[in-house]
Image (cartoon, rainbow, N blue to C red):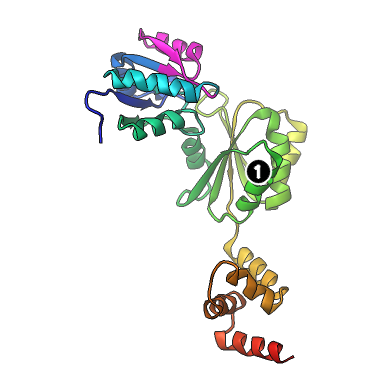
């Protein structure tokens, strides 16, 4: 329910490079808002000055996103309208705006999003990769354990994969991706919508070789081919075949399945009938 008398939080997409990509609706909202919350007020001030907009600015970024969210919610409760902008692109996508939007929803304060530039969609549509199904992971975690966990998940991801990466980490990330995913197709997009925009379609091996000779420059969006379903099925089948029937059964029984249902799953995994599994287990019990 909308809190009576409360203002509205407007998530305003701003250009990721080309200032011509801002929408009239966003400009009108920035002009009419009581307050503009910005990831970097200096960067946003340049944008506002370019369009002749004079409005109060306040900072809202990764390092104050929780405490400042409560301050902004107080403004909204008083009936003020707030426009939230990130440095570039759509707020709440790999962005602290996610926290503020969530808190507003929890407090019954209206949130609306004004469509516009988004780096992941821009990169995906120009990559030549399948756009029917895709997943967005943002920046890979820096924590080594979580980093490895996410990469292992992505290894089995059949959808097109989209990642963000900073130039100083690109080479290491390409190496990690190749090590876990194998030699997949990848399109590396940089400087999107800017003068030196570049989209490089190649393989992970090719990308590693390319960046041995070239220094990464600018922020990157990596669009990576998803896993091959047939290859995954063969891998799973091989894994099951190398496992004893009892161990295979235990995998599903540990998940809470009954003996009968576990036999069905095992039979499906191995491409045989449930009766075959039952007879094999029975023979094993007699041994």
Residue 255 located left or right of residue 38 = right
Quarter occupied by residue 101: top left
Residue drawn at (64%, 30%), measured in percent from left and top? 166
Q: Which residue is at the front of the view, 260 or 122?
A: 260
Mark 1 lies on residue:
146
Q: Residue 115 appears at what percent x and percent y?
A: 36, 32
Residue drawn at (67%, 72%), measured in percent from left and top? 240
Quarter occupied by residue 212: top right
Which residues are the magenta region? Answer: 37-62
31 w.r.t. 103: above or below:
above
Do we see residue 142 in this rendering? yes
285 w.r.t. 235: above or below:
below
Image quadrant containing the N terminus:
top left
277 w.r.t. 110: above or below:
below
Helix, strand or loop at label 1? It is helix
For mark 1, does the 10 Å Cα neighbourhood hold few (<14), some (14 to 19), or many (20 or more) residues? few
């Amino acid at each position: 329910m909308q809190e009576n008398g409360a203002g509205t939080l407007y998530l305003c997409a701003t250009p990721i490079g080309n200032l011509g990509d801002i929408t009239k609706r966003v400009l009108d909202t920035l002009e009419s808002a009581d307050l503009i919350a910005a990831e970097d007020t200096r960067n946003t001030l340049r944008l506002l000055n370019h369009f002749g907009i004079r409005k109060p600015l306040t900072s809202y970024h990764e390092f104050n996103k929780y405490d400042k969210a409560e301050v902004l919610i107080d403004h909204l409760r008083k009936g003020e309208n707030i426009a939230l902008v990130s440095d570039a692109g759509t707020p709440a996508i790999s962005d602290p705006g996610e926290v503020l939007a969530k808190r507003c929803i929890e407090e019954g304060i209206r949130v609306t999003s004004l469509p516009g530039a988004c780096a992941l969609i821009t990169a995906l549509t120009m990559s030549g990769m399948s756009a029917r199904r895709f997943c967005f992971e943002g920046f890979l975690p820096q924590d080594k354990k979580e980093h490895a966990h996410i990469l292992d998940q992505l290894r089995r991801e059949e959808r097109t994969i989209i990642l963000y990466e900073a130039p100083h980490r690109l080479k290491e990330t390409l190496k990690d991706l190749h090590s876990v995913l194998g030699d997949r197709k990848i399109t590396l997009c940089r400087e999107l919508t800017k003068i030196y925009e570049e989209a490089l379609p190649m393989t992970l091996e090719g990308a590693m070789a390319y960046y041995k000779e070239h220094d990464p420059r600018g922020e990157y969006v990596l669009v990576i081919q998803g896993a091959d379903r047939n290859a995954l099925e063969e891998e799973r089948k091989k894994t099951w075949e190398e496992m004893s029937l009892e161990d295979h059964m235990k995998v599903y029984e540990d998940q809470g399945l009954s003996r009968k249902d576990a036999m069905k799953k095992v039979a499906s995994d191995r491409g045989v009938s449930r009766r075959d599994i039952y007879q094999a287990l029975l023979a094993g019990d007699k041994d």
